[in-house]
Image (cartoon, helix red, strand yellow):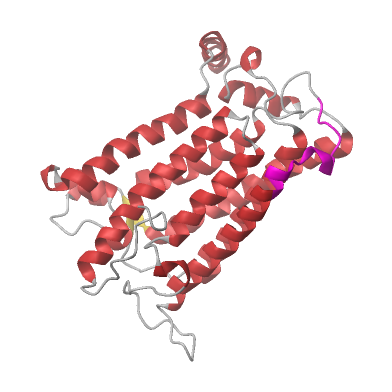
């Protein structure tokens, strides 16, 4: 029975060239554009249940709570689960890429079947990314997931009463699940009938080298921004947690934008796009990351201005000097 369902579904996927990964990221983008726009523009006209579902963290919904929506809320500290999963998943992808290089072999049949299923079917998958670019991108994504795993599990201070909706939790896992598959789905050695090309630094262009540098700069600046937020809740001398309140951050890129950690998240994904610029699915990933970070940054910026009377007027929400 299950085999019949799988075969029927796969035939539909291949016949219609239905790329599940593309569908997920396009869907995420459409939803966040619609609901993000509604929340940021006409929030007062929306029902409390919708506002409560969308908002979380410092800009969580402060009005009447919907009992049903409250039942679907979980601790915001569960954000750490995203990075336990993503770090493990990214390491698996990196190991498969390295194995392909070392053995000069196509990915295992099970991996090929899975990628065929989620990326449009065997007949519709083709090589868009050379294996060297994919390997470098995989290394960058893995070290990002590793650092976020470290931060959320050992450094970040979550408010005990802060909640997120289960939908945010699900989307977080689907994002990393899909983004890492997007990296592999059209890469040499992960498309049937292809082998990974020999690793060579000659395959990395000057533009890609620039992208690697930009990624490294953004990676370090995001860490510094996150540490500024962490240290706001600690005693400077003892290092003990002194508050769970959201305070006004200053220093670094916080002096010009309200959410530098979100800004550098977008820049890192753009930098990886420089390595995977021929990948349609990765482009969709970047668009989704941008609109998601923008929606959250606008809410955060609004919250800062509402809660700090002397909030610096020169600060923008997400993009320095622009937005």
Q: Is residue 193 above or below residue 221?
A: above
Q: In this image, 267 relative to 235: left or right? A: right
**Does 201 appear in magenta?**
yes
Name the residue located 70 percent from the left edge and 25 percent from the top edge: 112
**Where is residue 233 shown, x and y percent of the image?**
40, 78
**Where is residue 22 shown, x and y percent of the image?**
50, 27
**Does 233 appear in magenta?**
no
Asked if one can make out residue 104 in the rendered structure from this viewpoint, the answer is: yes
Of residues 309 and 281, the one drawn nearer to the viewer in this rendering: 309
Residue at the farthest bottom position: 237
Q: Is residue 161 above or below residue 63?
A: below
Name the residue located 67 percent from the left edge and 26 percent from the top edge: 128
Name the residue located 35 percent from the left edge and 32 percent from the top edge: 30
Which residue range is magenta in the image? 195-209
Name the residue located 51 percent from the left edge and 10 percent from the top edge: 16
Asked if one can make out residue 170 in the rendered structure from this viewpoint, the answer is: no
Q: In this image, 106 relative to 265: left or right? A: right
Mark count? 0
**Where is residue 278 shown, x and y percent of the image?**
63, 29
**Residue 277, located in which quarter of the rendered image?**
top right
Q: In this image, 77 relative to 59: left or right? A: right
Q: In this image, 105 relative to 124: left or right? A: right
**Where is residue 103 shown, x and y percent of the image?**
88, 35
**Residue 281, located in which quarter of the rendered image?**
top right
């Amino acid at each position: 029975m299950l085999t019949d369902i799988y075969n029927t579904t796969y035939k539909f996927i291949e016949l219609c060239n239905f790329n599940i990964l593309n569908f997920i990221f396009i869907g995420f983008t459409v939803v966040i554009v619609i609901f993000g726009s509604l929340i940021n523009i006409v929030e007062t006209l929306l029902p409390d249940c919708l506002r409560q579902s969308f908002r979380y963290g410092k800009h969580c919904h402060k009005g009447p709570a919907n009992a049903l929506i409250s039942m679907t809320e979980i601790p915001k500290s569960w954000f750490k689960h995203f990075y336990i999963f993503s770090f493990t998943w990214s390491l698996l992808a990196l190991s498969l890429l390295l194995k392909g290089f070392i053995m000069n072999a196509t990915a295992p049949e099970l991996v090929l079947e899975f990628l065929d299923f989620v990326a449009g079917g065997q007949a519709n998958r083709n090589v868009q990314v050379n294996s060297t670019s994919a390997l470098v991108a995989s290394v960058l994504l893995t070290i990002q997931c590793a650092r976020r795993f470290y931060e959320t599990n050992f450094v970040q201070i979550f408010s005990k009463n802060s909640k997120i909706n289960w939908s945010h939790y699900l989307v977080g896992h689907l994002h990393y699940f899909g983004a890492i598959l997007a990296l592999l789905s059209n890469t040499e050695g992960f498309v049937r009938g292809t082998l990974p090309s020999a690793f060579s630094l000659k395959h990395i262009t000057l533009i890609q080298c620039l992208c690697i540098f930009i990624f490294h700069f953004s990676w370090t600046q995001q860490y510094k921004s996150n540490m500024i937020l962490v240290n706001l809740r600690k005693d400077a001398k003892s290092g003990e947690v002194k508050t769970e309140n959201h305070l006004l951050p200053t220093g670094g890129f916080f002096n010009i934008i309200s959410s530098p950690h979100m800004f550098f998240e977008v820049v890192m994904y753009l930098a990886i796009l420089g390595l995977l610029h021929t990948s349609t699915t990765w482009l969709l990933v970047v668009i989704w990351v941008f609109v998601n970070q923008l929606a959250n940054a606008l809410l955060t910026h609004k919250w800062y201005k509402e809660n700090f009377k002397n909030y610096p007027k020169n600060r923008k929400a997400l993009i320095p000097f622009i937005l």
